[in-house]
Image: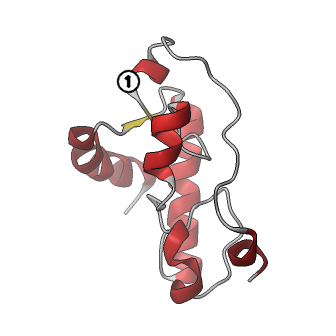
Amino acid sequence: MNAKELHDALKKIQEPKGCYFNADASMTMALMESLLVNKERLGYMACPCRLANGTLEADRDIVCPCEYREADMAEYGACFCGLYVTSDWNEGKRERVYVPERRPVEKILG
């Protein structure tokens, strides 16, 4: 699977849930590529914007879409890495601000 195929497959699943890809196509496709690299390297698509521990059990919360995405999108209009956004965010109707890390420190430190 290549980045375009992954993008198209995920788009069909995520858009009905109100989760849109960032309109910045170069950023979105770079993140798609990174997800595929993590899939090849780790066996699962860990969030490309976080340091994965290397085991599915330890990283389950950051398998894309991560378990923090919904809260990030509700509060900020975008997920932590900016891959998934709301339609308002994409249309510039929502202020684009830094999305802080929600992952607990103990999970980050392993």
Give the left or right position of residue 71, taking residue 17 as reference.
Answer: right
Q: Residue at x 59, y 84 (%)?
A: 58
Residue nearer the viewer, 11 or 66: 66
Number of callouts:
1
Residue 87 appears in view? yes
Q: In what quadrant of the picture does the C terminus appear?
A: bottom right
Compare residues 47 and 67 and report the one nearer the observer. Answer: 67
53 sits to left or right of 35? right
Residue 84 visible? The answer is no
Residue in view at x 33 percent, y 52 percent? 5
**Observer-nearest residue: 22 or 80?**
80
**Furthest-right residue in this view:** 109
Note whether 13 is above or below 105 in the view shown: above
What's under tag 1, amino acid-wise? Ser
Q: Please state the horizontal and vertical placement of residue 102, each as a whole percent of the image.
A: 64, 56
Rendered position, 77 above or below 11: above
Q: Is residue 52 above or below residue 31?
A: below
Which quadrant would the N terminus be assigned to in this image? bottom left
Judge left or right: residue 71 versus residue 100. left
Q: Position of residue 105 (x, y in %)?
A: 75, 69
Residue at label 1?
A: 87
Residue, x 79% and y 78% (percent of image)?
A: 109
Q: Quadrant of residue 20?
A: top left
- Please tell me which residue is depicted at 60% across the width and 17% down the height of the picture: 95
Q: Which of 48/36 is in front?
A: 48
Dot 1 alpha-carbon crowd within 10 angstroms: few under 14, some 14 to 19, many 20 or more:
some
**Secondary element at image label 1:** helix
Residue 3: x and y, percent?
Answer: 44, 52
Specify the color scheme: secondary structure
